[in-house]
Amino acid sequence: MSELAYKRTNVYEVADEKLMKEIFDYAEGYKVFLDEGKTEREVCAFVEAEAKKQGYVPFEFGTKLKAGDKVYYNNRGKNIYLIKVGKADVAKDGIRILASHIDSPRIDLKQVPLYESEGIAFGKTHYYGGIRKYQWATIPLALHGTVALADGSKLNVKIGEGENDPVFYISDLLPHLAAKQNVKPLGEALGGEDLNIWFGNIPYTAAKDEKDKTVKENLLRILNEKYGMKEADFLSAELSLVPAYNAKDIGFDRGLIGAYGHDDRVCSYPAYTALFDEASDEHTVMVVLADKEEIGSEGTTGMQCAIFTDLINEIASSFGVTSAAVRAKSKCLSADVNAGYDPNFPDVCEKLNSAYVSHGAGITKFTGARGKSGSSDADAEYVGYLRKLFDENGVIWQTGELGRVDVGGGGTVAKFIANMNIDTIDIGVPVISMHAPYEVISKADLYEEYLAFRAFIK
Ligand code: MN
Ligand code: MN
């Protein structure tokens, strides 16, 4: 091919022995992170502990920050901000922001979940985020979450991850009896109210009262014995069913990783590790690990919450400058995954503008759907700035659009940050089977994403 033509680079094709070792070593830490944090609360706690080890201290509003400070703000245990204050003047240099999200699609329990039918105790659910419902049946599920108990104390729940833990289950029809279901559109095979969790089936035979000899009563007694819970405690609980699988290498050559929740922990992990590993003290850097992206970034822990600009205000006022001045000079990488090109489903992608697995960090200039609607669409100048930066730092990157123009689309937190007058673009790892209980990414892309972040904050 002519030197004038553009061609993507396959990381695994060009990687030397040293880079291959770095890629594979880095992936080991990521797999631990995935297994330890399957909900935003768990990721938040994990990253807070890591930040403390790196000398980060809790930030209190009203504290005057100075160059060299390393602080974090744990927002309600579900969203965390890490801030490293640089030497450069924030009014001139702004803040380098890496924003990703730590919530992933899952199945949440309803507030009154328990019922019994024909000797089986079930839990009613309402799914969280965009899932293909049929994918969540007949797989092992673990129960994670938090219960605010009647006495004001808090109970953290994690059942189904230990070697000897029980797991939970959503049933589906056997093929022998599925003739009617088989001809339904795929999206209607299982409805939202069909995602009922199998919780147990042994009745409480020791009950004095005949009407209490039920499976539900037995379940309540187990919950009470083990956790001190009563049925009413579900009213003030956030309990989620997530896949009970752990992260594993995929394929004979181990170049890929399968796991639950790559979207968007595959960007969160490189974001905070890049911050910790980058020794440069020039720029002020903020890493945001946001909650609620999968349901619209609303609420106190989502990217649209004022806490984001409140923290920028605190940085600005520490140096006696306006928040507006700081935001005008700030730059953000909205770190979120993109759809990787899957040769098994070529029809939904446009080949020239897809993100390819193992071809590096994927820049998405615009998201949105049907005519870029709902996208913040970054400037050519900002893409140009990053292009130069990444090329100079040897980062392998590509661009990719989320599917063919009229097929679908999606959004990220990018627009909420861009709306604050901050140059923002999406950059992420291509994912195969996004939002499925087990998604796949390339170790090479994970590492290039990390290198891109390091170049950005250096
Ligand atoms: Mn995402
Ligand atoms: Mn998503």
Image: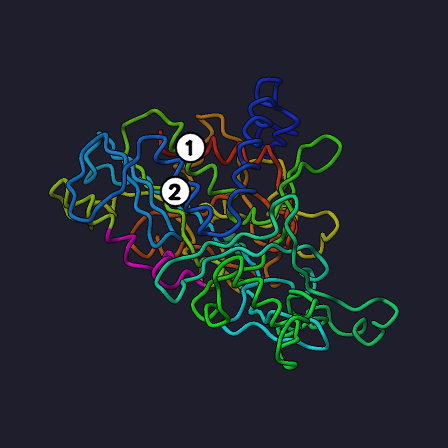
Q: As drawn, which residue projects farthest toward the left?
A: 320
Is residue 126 positioned above or below 259 on the image?
Answer: below
In the rendering, at what x and y percent does residue 247 appear? Answer: 62, 41
Q: Main secondary structure of the magenta part?
A: loop
Is residue 386 in view from this perspective? yes
Q: As drawn, which residue projects farthest toward the front?
A: 208
Label 2 crowding class (10 Å Cα cut-off): few <14, some 14-19, many 20+? many
The secondary structure type at the circle numbered 2 is strand
In the rendering, at what x and y percent does residue 124 appear? Answer: 59, 71
Q: Compare marks 1 and 2 and give the one earlier in the sequence.
A: 2
In the rendering, at what x and y percent does residue 308 appear? Answer: 30, 52
Residue 98: image tag:
2
Q: What stretch is highlighted in magenta?
A: 296-310
Residue at (53, 48) in percent of width and height = 337
Residue at (63, 50) in percent of width and height = 165
The amino acid sitting under disc 2 is Leu
Residue 274: image tag:
1
Placement of the C terminus among the 4 image quadrants: top left
